[in-house]
Image: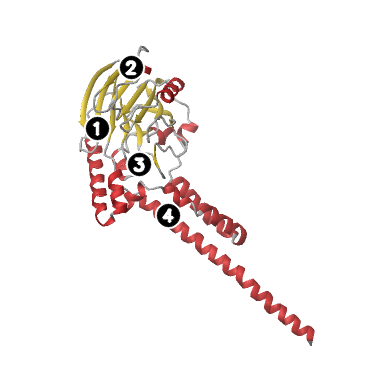
Amino acid sequence: MGSFKDQETRNVVGSSQGVEPSRLGWAIAACCWIYLLIVFTAWMALRAGDLWWPATLLLFSPRWLLAIPLLPLALAALCWRRRSLIVVLLALVLVLGSIMNFNIPWHTAVSAAPSGMRLRVLTCNMHYGQPEGPTLERLLTETNPDVVAIQELRREPFDFFAGKQWHIHHRTGGHFLASRYPIRQTEHLGYQSMTVPGSLMRYELETPTGPLILFSLHFASPRESLNETVHLPETGFVELEDNSAVRWQQSENLLRLVEKTTDPVLLVGDFNTPPESAIFRRIWDRYTDAFTAAGWGWGYTFFNKRTMVRIDHILAGPGWYCERCWVGPNIGSPHHPLLADLILVQP
């Protein structure tokens, strides 16, 4: 009789102990699915960047914060709910790939580069400062670019280019160009980054294959409107929408200028627009983004406190093949230099 009661007691205790792991497993599964839903929603919202102000705010926010739950959820699923690991894996792919925009240049990775004139381009927004001489000189010596386009350089050009067969143009207002090819023509098309024309220069270079048109630009920064939206959301969102409208107009105006060009064309500089933005996807879809075509990784060019975004670009018109693109080291600006190896394919 006693042994029967003891067995019954053990069964009750065992069943009650089995309830908690089951509930914990369901809770972990629910957390994993909720997290995946949040990540998926954020990914979809990014596509509305510069169309809808909350999506624009997300576009310039520290998106890496969405990756923080990945590790604890993965460990919890591994210990108590292994079937949920596939949900965490899907979230991992979305966060690191689609949301943080990890880039793999599949096309250039499997195809051979064509023949043609090679050109290495470097661009950087100095953010109204002066480059760190030794760091920049080391970068230029190691990479040996053919064209160096710098925006918002307020002081006189640095000494590195003196007496080294460089062709130099420096205009008060920030634009600087150093080219190994003669600069045949320059045109200042815009003076202020926050106005509709933007800060914009047009250069004509004489290359062995003929004229090359290069636009160096700095478009409207959303920095102030983002701060206003975070601290005064009831009114700040209006400024954020206005900034998006200005960048729309700036890109549309530049596109009209570029489409009039019959020579090979490159656009370099600070667009202040990430590649996920509707502006970038709709206006510049016919032009080759060098990093998307030939860059590995996230390619962030702007670093400020917790935020990292890719807003500096090298865009190539028809006839160009992008062989390689990468981000250089810090040279004294929140913007890091962007470099690309391009090939002008012979017709």
Which residue does the numbered mark 1 point to in the structure image? Answer: 199
What percent of the width, then of the height, locates residue 30? 51, 64
Real-space Cα separation, disc 3 to disc 2, in angstroms: 32 Å
Position above or below: 25 against 263: below
Q: Nearer the viewer, residue 271 or 287?
A: 271
At label 3, the amino acid type is Pro
Image disc number at residue 274: 3
Q: Are marks 3 and 2 in contact (CB under 8 Å)?
A: no
The mark nearer the N terminus, 4 or 2, is 4
Residue depicted at 46% across the width and 45% down the height:
97
Real-space Cα separation, disc 4 to disc 2, in angstroms: 47 Å
The mark nearer the N terminus, 3 or 2, is 2
Q: Is 156 left or right of 44, judged from the image as shown?
A: left
Disc 1: CA contacts within 10 A as few (<14), some (14-19) or many (>=20): many
Q: Is 11 left or right of 285, judged from the image as shown?
A: right
Q: How is the image coloured?
A: secondary structure
